[in-house]
Amino acid sequence: MPIEPTIKSRPVYGTLSPQPGTDHLFIADAEGAEAILDLAKSAPPGFFDAAEIVFIPRASGDGYLAALHALKPARFYEGPSIGAALPRLKQTFATAHMGLRLYLSGTEGLIGQAMQAALDAGIDHSSIQTEHRGSLARRVQCVHCKGVTEDVTTQPVTCSHCGLLLLVRDHYSRRLAAFQGVCINAEDQSEKVPVEEVFR
Amino acid sequence: MGIQFRTETFRDDFTFRNSPEHIRRFPFPFHEDSYMYAVNIEPHVPGPKGSVLENLIDVDEHYVSEMADRALVLAEDPLRCQSLPHMTLAGWDLLELLMTEQAKGYPEHFTLTRDGDNWHWINRPLGIDQKFVFGDLSTLPYGPMEYITRQSQGDFCILDQRDGNLWMDAGIVTTQADWSLDFDIGMNFFEWHAPVPLAHEKGVFTRALKFLLNIQQGQPARRLNWTMTINPRLDTSPENFHKWGPDRTTVTPENVGQKVHLRVELQSFWRLPRSNAMVFPIRCYLIKMDELATSKKWARRLHRVLRDLPEELATYKGLTRYRPTVVEWLAKHDDGAPTSSGFGPD
Ligand code: HEM
């Protein structure tokens, strides 16, 4: 299901396509692998010779590993979470040279956090491509306690830090790589609000 | 003689109120009996003596108490004041603007003496006497933006101008109508306005941005915005929404006059000389319904505006729960007579 543009702060995503140059870095989680595999179909020969793939399988397990390895990237890293991969990514970004092309695919949480680290390192926006694949789960920052709750699929959601029941808004901060969560029953906290699974 | 500064609170026991002179000078925001978003921007030129526009940076009887409230907010939550690294020069620009304007408008309360980069600032109401070197961070107790905005009423956003857009890259925000600087910092004009209903579709923001990008130094502009607040609370932040939200359930026909406040923001737009950034002061004025109703015209008009306000705006402004009670109270002050055009009381 494509992500609809709703309000102006809400990110929208494109489709990965092979860019000129030799220095390609792919960062993907779960179904994000499919975006890499689709790009590979139209990539020129030798495209992955100097490429690196950073892959977080999550629920996909080893489902995509063989296909990704078959692309024969110069480097392949498999990690347990984007959080665990960030330190090495920051190192890569800090030492990257101008020609680096970045391809981010998968969940919004992964795209947002990898983007945040890249922009912080001064990587130009125009050299980053994104494609959303897989779960619509959101990364949500509680506006009250400032804690971030990962992989939010319900509306509303209980803040994993302070326990307030949060309305997940479309308002999005690139700097925080998170949607905003605001107490949904702040006026009367005794009000019961039905919780629905909406970001699948 | 100068301004008689009131000692009052904007939290807990809420002792805030306006003196009769301050009720008369309240910047009533409705020039007709209905309201819809528009590009309501005009040149920020001085207005009539005694009005909030007499000086382009207005200081009023609430100054000292508002600054005390700001200090409380900042002590609880330092994220209300932030400045991205490239914004320091704009902070010095803002310090110059606010010191100059306050000293010019209120010489009995503020004095600025400049000898090259050696400046001497005296703020009598707050008991501050500060010698410092303009441009030298080590000579002030805070960064320049924080230093001067702890001594200036209203919130301030500093916008960096690049790529044909404005970027909210610094600010101090403690008297806001339910938006978060910490969340919005780094966003552009369209992104931080994203939650506003209807106005994007009407092209309001595209036209407004075009206007702002062309503002020249020495030619500031202004507009009014409004909402309503239960109890005279300055800090209606999303951060603390779970603490002040319950106030909205406390409105009854008996307490409307004391509890319900019209909240008006006098927003101005200034080009800064050294950084080419833009500063956006958001000056908040509060008036309780009892005070507002001392003007027949204001009460009559607010009744009609609130009654007919489009649902999307009422929801966005958070009025839903208590609007009917307030409209009913105001209806008693509306004899159906025509209202004269313009903002002023009768
Ligand atoms: C560059 C200076 C400006 C800044 C920093 C600014 C900031 C903001 C912010 C933070 C909000 C709250 C959005 C939210 O709900 O999270 C807002 C609301 C709004 N702004 Fe601006 N704004 C600026 C200029 C303008 C201009 C020139 C217009 C002209 C039409 C405008 C029209 C509005 C409107 C209509 C709202 C909704 C207010 C309400 O209904 O209470 N703004 N603005």
Image (cartoon, helix red, strand yellow):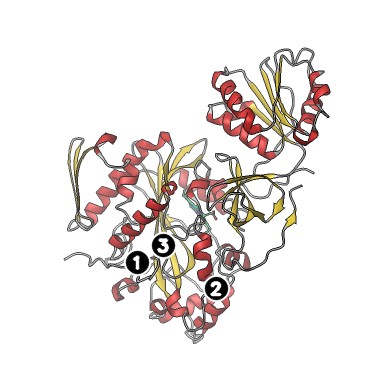
Q: Quadrant of the N terminus of chain B?
A: bottom left
Instruction: Identify which residue, B314 or B325, lies in the foreground.
Output: B325
Q: Earlier in the sequence, mark 2 or mark 1?
A: 1
* Spatial CA span between label 2 and label 3: 18 Å
Instruction: Identify which residue, B305 or A39, lies in the foreground.
Output: A39
Residues marked 2 and 3 touching at CB (< 8 Å): no
The residue pinned by badge 2 equals B249
Above or below, comparing residue B261 to residue A111 in the picture? below
Which element is circle 1 on? loop
Residue B325, by quadrant, is bottom right
The residue pinned by badge 3 equals B234
Residues marked 1 and 3 touching at CB (< 8 Å): no
| Residue for point 31% across, 62% down | B65
Q: Earlier in the sequence, mark 1 or mark 3?
A: 1
Specify the subunit that label 2 lies on: B
The residue pinned by badge 1 equals B9
Which element is circle 2 on? helix
Q: How many marks?
A: 3
| Residue for point 60% across, 43% down | A178
Residue A49, by quadrant, is top right
* Spatial CA span between label 1 and label 3: 9 Å
- Mark 2 is on which residue type? Thr
Which element is circle 3 on? loop
| Residue for point 52% across, 38% down | B164
